[in-house]
Each structure stands twice: as C-alpha cells, then as structure tokens.
Image (cartoon, grey):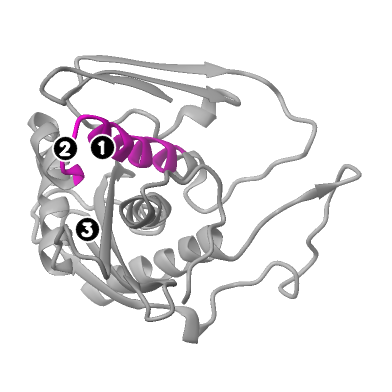
Amino acid sequence: MSGTVDKKGLPVAWEHCIGGTSISAEGASHPYQIPNTRIIVQDIGAVIPRGDWRSVAPHYNAMAVESFFDELARAGDQDPLELRLRLLNGKSQRLRKVVEMAASHAGWTRGSVTSFFGVAALSHWGSHVAEVIELERTAKGQLKLKRVTCAIDCGIVINPDIVAQQMESSIVFALTAATRSKITIGEGRVEQNNFYDYPILRANETPEVNVVIASSREDPGGIGEPGVPPLAPALANALLAATDKPVRELPVSVVG
C-alpha cells in the first residue's frame, strides 16, 4: 500500500499491490473519491493449499484498505471518520449513511485518554456495512474490547432478527480471527489441528455487540458475509488511535 496527501491533508494518490490470483483482488476497490487510484495484482502462486474462508478475499482486502485509509488520514492530520464521510459521495451514499449510523450509535469521540474508537466500512454482496470498535484502557493499562457497533443497509429486510443474528455471528467470527486464531506452517504442513490450538472466542471474551439496521426499499443484499470484513480494520484503527502504531499483522492481543 502506498499513497500521497496534498497540502490540505487530503488523499490524492492511492496504490494497492496484491500478491495472489485474480480472485485475490475482490473487494480491493475502495469507495473513496481519490483522484489517482491504481490496483495491481501479481500472481505469485502458492505452495501451500488454500481454501475459501467466510467472506473470501474482501476479508483481507478490507483490512488493508480500511486500515491504510486511517494511516493516510493521520498523515494529513485528518479525523478518519470525518475524512471518510467527506470522501464518500456519489454512488457511495448508502455506505456513507451506515458509517454515520454506526458512529452515532457508538458515541464516537476523540481525545479521550481511556476510550479509543476505530471505524471501517465495506460495500459488497449488495449490502453496505460499517463497524465501530471501542477500546477502553483498564486501570492496569491494558486495552480492553468494550463494544462493537454495526450498522447495515442490506436493502429490504424481511426478518430483522435474522439480519442481526448474521451480523453478530460475523462479528464473533471476525473477532476470533483478529484476536485469537492463527495458522502457522511447519515443515510444509499446517501446525494447528483443532480448537485446543486454534481457539475461538468464548462468551466471556466477547464484548457488547450492537446492530443497527437501516430502513431501505432497495433490492435485498447479502447478510452472511458482509459483516466480517470491516471488523479487523476497525479494531486495527482503534489500536492505532490508542497506541499511534499501525497494525501490520494479525492476530493482535487485546483483553476480552
């Protein structure tokens, strides 16, 4: 990832180079109004067998895109939430709306020494999702997951309970991947075998999760996968706000 900001602190150039295959670029196209954007895919092959994961390529591309966006915002001395809203226009109005909804319901603030927020958003599978992570600093100085707020516009909603359940399960799945589960390779093999060395998030480690559903008359979109990709970058951006250090590798360590 590389980018440039102008004298006003606004992004004017964006380059994203992806190592993988053609499907690896899915979800890499960002929604922001940045005048010079280039996405490159380099097919590097793989000696380790790979399989599809929940939300497939948009999961890791959203991590790259949305966390890098916050780094560009900081480089230009811009508030990452305000900059998102400024650069989301035109065809991205529905995404802009859910970003506003998620931030509002999360109680987004800046400048606190005990609470830190990160936001990330994605439009894919016909749906638009934004998620806000709130971290709090404990008395011992640790960073604790306090709350996840999710806003989704998936078009016409038939059963809101199912939409909320899908978002909640997506968040738990993505939080598990971002903070607990890790695949390592040894002697050409995956070293993990089962839940004892590939842990999942437990109920007592899961923060408060709030889901807000936008009222929409648009065609129905997907709900099984869109809730996964924004989680990891929202967490990374909250950690960036708390530590001033960008997240370059997952999983990260936070208190559940």
Measuring 37% from the left and 81% from the top, which residue is drawn there? 139
Residue 114 located left or right of residue 27: left
Give me the disc on residue 152.
3
Measuring 54% from the left and 74% from the top, which residue is drawn there? 201
Q: Which SS class for mark 2? A: loop
Gap between marks 3 and 2 measured at Cα: 25 Å
**Closer to viewer: mark 3 or mark 1:** 1
| Residue that badge 2 annotates | 78
Q: Which SS class for mark 1? A: helix
* Residue 101 on image: x %, y %: 12, 59
Measuring 27% from the left and 31% from the top, which residue is drawn there? 75
Q: Is residue 61 at all visible to an observer of this figure? A: yes
Q: Which residues are magenta?
A: 61-80
Gap between marks 2 and 1 measured at Cα: 6 Å
Q: Which SS class for mark 3? A: strand
- Is 79 part of what is drawn in magenta? yes
User: As displayed, is residue 47 above or below residue 250?
Assistant: above
Q: Is residue 159 at all visible to an observer of this figure? A: no
* Residue 26 on image: x %, y %: 44, 32
Between 221 and 169, the one lying in front of the other is 169
User: As displayed, is residue 78 above or below residue 120?
Assistant: above
Residue lying farthest bottom?
204
